[in-house]
Image (spheres, rainbow, N blue to C red):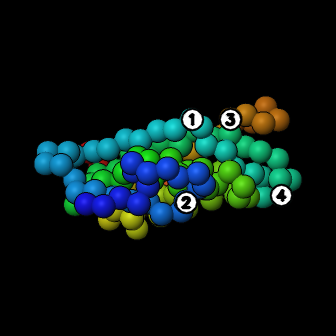
Amino acid sequence: MEFEALGKVVREPRKKLEVFPKPDHVTTVIMESDEVTSLCPITGQPDWETVIIEYMPDKFCIESKSLKLYLWSFREEGAFCEALAATIAGDIYQACSPHWCKVTIIQKPRGGIKITASAFYGERSNVV
């Protein structure tokens, strides 16, 4: 399997999520980053988020370096926290076709308000 980002020098964000075959007996994958930033789509002010990605792989898993580069791509994009959760969940679901995936965004407080938003794709009957 040839990766475009893993093992290579990449100096800019990318929207492409790369995958690899799911190892036997893996039932759930959880990936978390507390280093995600985006912009408020109205004011342009920066927002800092923790992103938690949970999924039940079918045939493929998300490669982590491509995920890091993908999350970096939101740094200069305007998005509400709720829309960011839906976008990431949809992209994860499209990239690796899991049985289900859930993305939770926890936006650090701004103006004293902390926001947590989740988006879910897939079959809820398969949720562990």
Mark 2 or mark 3: whose residue is earlier in sequence: 2
Image position of 99 (left or right of 114): left
Mark 4 highlights which residue? 42
- Tell me residue 117's x, y (percent): 58, 47
- Tell me residue 56's x, y (percent): 29, 51
Residue type, label 1: Asp
Secondary structure beneath dot 2 equals loop
Determine the residue located farthest toward the left in the rendered image: 24
Secondary structure beneath dot 1 equals strand
Mark 1 highlights which residue? 34
Gap in Å between the C-alphas at discs 2 and 1? Answer: 18 Å
Mark 2 highlights which residue? 14
Residue type, label 2: Arg
Mark 3 highlights which residue? 108
The C terminus appears in which quarter of the rendering?
Answer: top left
- Tell me residue 59's x, y (percent): 22, 60
Q: Residue at x 48, y 63 (%)?
A: 16
Identify the image quadrant of residue 36: top right
Nearer the viewer's eye, disc 2 or disc 3? 2
Disc 3: CA contacts within 10 A as few (<14), some (14-19) or many (>=20): some
- Is residue 124 visible from the viewing direction of this image? no
Q: Are marks 2 and 3 in contact (CB under 8 Å)?
A: no
The N terminus appears in which quarter of the rendering?
Answer: bottom left
